[in-house]
Amino acid sequence: MRHLIKRRRLVVLLGAATTLVVVLGMLWRSAIKRNRSVPDEPFRIAGNLYYVGATGVTAFLLTGPEGHVLIDGGYPETAPLIMASIAKLGFDITDVRVLLNSHAHSDHAGGLRALQEASGAELWISEGDADVIAAGGAGDRTLGPFRFLGFLGLGRFPASRVDHRFKDGATIRLGPLTLTAHVTAGHTPGCTSWSFPVHDGDRELLAVDICSLTLFPYVSKLVEPETYPGIRSDFERSFSVLRSLPADIFLASHANWFSMKRKLLERSDAENPVEPFIDRAGYLSFIDRAEATFRETLAKQQRRP
Ligand SMILES: [Zn+2]
């Protein structure tokens, strides 16, 4: 009898686990489809800064006389869209010399290898995320227990060759282009936000591309045992680092975080098409909302770790 109950419990558990895996797989696929099937038209944000990403996951092209810089590769399926967008704007993928990334997750690093192969560009990754990028997502501690589902493809993507590893505060130069790496860790140990000047007429604007401040529900642990050692203090630091940057143009690794669609619509009424994208208030309120969620999660986990 006891045997029978045990077996029944096992069957129920296995059933629940299978359903969870199937549901996760479906969510994963639908996220990819959403980001892939409705690509936005590429467009100029300001000066030499262009949007070449998809509807959901972003990619930015910063052009210069000695070659271009491309930030983020989207999913593996996004890479051909990014290349098509670069060509549509009249640029050549082989002129992309520097390839950068926000963080080592498949929705931003998945397309890097294809872009690296097509362009011949050198890939720069922060020390905290370099191993995971070079291993195609393997060893990603931020996925918590789900990292063991790697054999199902969860969190995995084509591995890229990491040409340069950098620390927080690194400056990357390509001719007159200068980009500063701000390691705003927490979402991943090497999550990198990028800041760089963009010229609009005779004024200089600072663009800041926020990596991510997202916590994974039920996965991100801010109390012992932390998802990775130091995740809590990393997040705390990231909020203050990002607030300290004098951002004019607010960008991020997901287009809805900086309300790209709304800003594009607002352009038709704007005297200068750059204006809707100058959004320091939106930038700060995004950080505030992320911090509020972080504080709430932390308090909950401290009550019941
Ligand atoms: Zn991510």
Image (cartoon, grey):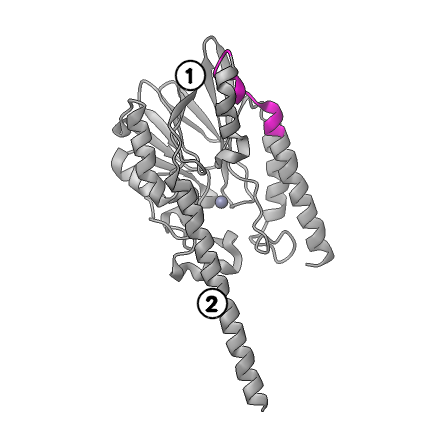
From this viewpoint, which residue is outermost toward the bottom? 1
Question: Residue 288, position in %: x, y?
Answer: 65, 34
Residue appearing at x 54%, y 31% in the figure: 258
74 or 170: which is nearer to us?
A: 74
From this viewpoint, which residue is outermost toward the top? 202
Question: Residue 21, position in %: x, y?
Answer: 47, 62
Vertical placement of residue 253 versus 216, above or below: above
Q: Quadrant of residue 120?
A: top left
**Residue type at mark 2?**
Thr
Q: Is residue 136 left or right of residue 294?
A: left
Q: Which residue is mark 1?
A: 47
Q: Give the total of numbered labels.
A: 2
Is the CB of mark 1 within 8 Å of ligand 1?
no
**Residue type at mark 1?**
Gly
Bounds of the magenta segment: 271-284
Is residue 162 visible in this depiction of the protein? no
Residue appearing at x 43%, y 43% in the figure: 34
Q: Dot 2: within a 10 Å radius of its alpha carbon, few (fewer than 14), some, or many (20 or more) residues?
A: few
Question: Residue 257, position in %: x, y?
Answer: 54, 35
Question: Residue 14, position in %: x, y?
Answer: 49, 73
Q: Dot 1: within a 10 Å radius of its alpha carbon, few (fewer than 14), some, or many (20 or more) residues?
A: some
Is the CB of mark 2 within 8 Å of ligand 1?
no
Going from the N terminus, do you reach mark 2 or mark 1 first?
2
Helix, strand or loop for disc 1 = loop
Is 273 included in the stretch rendered in magenta?
Answer: yes
Q: Is residue 230 left or right of residue 51?
A: right
Mark 2 or 1: in front is: 2
- Is the C terminus in the top left, top right, bottom left or bottom right quadrant? bottom right
Q: Which residue is mark 2?
A: 18
Is 162 included in the stretch rendered in magenta?
Answer: no
